[in-house]
Amino acid sequence: MRIESREDLKTWASFKNISVYLDQKKILSNININIKHGENILILGPNGSGKSTFLKLLNRSIYPITKKDSSLKLFNKENINIWDVRKRIGFLFKEMEGRVNHGVKLYDLITSGFSGTFNSRYSKLLSEIEKVKVDNLINEWELNNIVNNEFLSLSDGEKRRALLARALVYEPDILILDEPFCNLDIKSSFILNQNLNRLIEQSINILYVTHNLESILPKTNRVILIKEGKIIKEGNPNEIINSKIISDLFKISINVVKQDGYWRSYPVSI
């Protein structure tokens, strides 16, 4: 069991009165929340509620509206270099798979974590230290047998493992994952769940979005509920994840239970 330290209590992301507009439509409204080291956080909410936008604020691909009384700080800085962010936070967004061109090998996909570009020529420019890191990740995520395969030819589970390896090249303390279990079959979801919990045991903090209660990581210790662009509730999963709150969140009558450390949901019988 991990022992909480003073470092765990430090805030690495601070949102103060943050609002976001996309195409003149308000997506997030007056977000106020602090995220600390030592927290593994689930963001839960209906489609279109602003979950992915919240995550993209953290990788600086989206910026909030500038207001006099608002601020967004990462590692206690309002202005931070994007490469400094990427060295401290690993990102996996569901649209990444669609950005990979035909012909890109799995190995080149992983090495692109250093350059940010899916191009094989950058693999030849890696330092010896970087090559060792990539080789270690290939072994750790059991990708050896497919390392020279074209990325787009892989199964959804293999693609997800490759993208996670890519997110870990800088050995970050924090992982931000948007729908990591999307389109995975039962076996792949179970394996990914186990692997992510293993990363948590290695003191990596995970902030993630999922729609599937069955995919909630057992080591999650904080839940943030977002609805219609606003944070409506947050706290310990044992207090937040229950039939009433989840039914209200998704506007559907369901029963929610926890069994053997995992959550389950099923319709209310009429």
Image (tube, grey):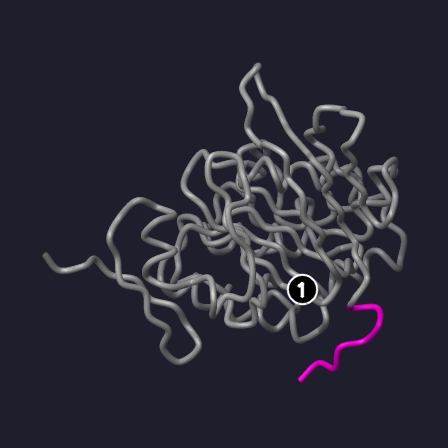
| Residue 124 locus on image (x, y percent) | 82, 44
Q: Is residue 155 magenta?
A: no
Q: Nearer the viewer, residue 162 or 264?
A: 264
Task: Name the quarter where the N terminus is drawn.
Answer: bottom right
Give the vertical position of 257 relative to 177 (above or below). below
Give the vertical position of 16 relative to 43 (above or below). above
Left or right: where does residue 226 sit relative to residue 267?
right
| Residue 210 locus on image (x, y percent) | 47, 52
Majority SS type along the magenta span: loop
Circle 1 is placed at which residue position? Answer: 39
Number of numbered discs: 1
Residue at 37 percent of width and 73 percent of height: 258
| Residue 186 locus on image (x, y percent) | 35, 63
Residue range in magenta is 1-8
- Residue 42, quarter of the rendered image: bottom right
Residue at 66 percent of width and 45 percent of height: 109
- Residue 119, quarter of the rendered image: top right
Residue at 58 percent of width and 42 percent of height: 93
Q: Nearer the viewer, residue 33 or 129?
A: 33
Residue type pointed to by label 1: Glu
Q: Is residue 5 magenta?
A: yes
| Residue 39 locus on image (x, y percent) | 67, 64
Task: Name the quarter where the C terminus is drawn.
Answer: bottom left
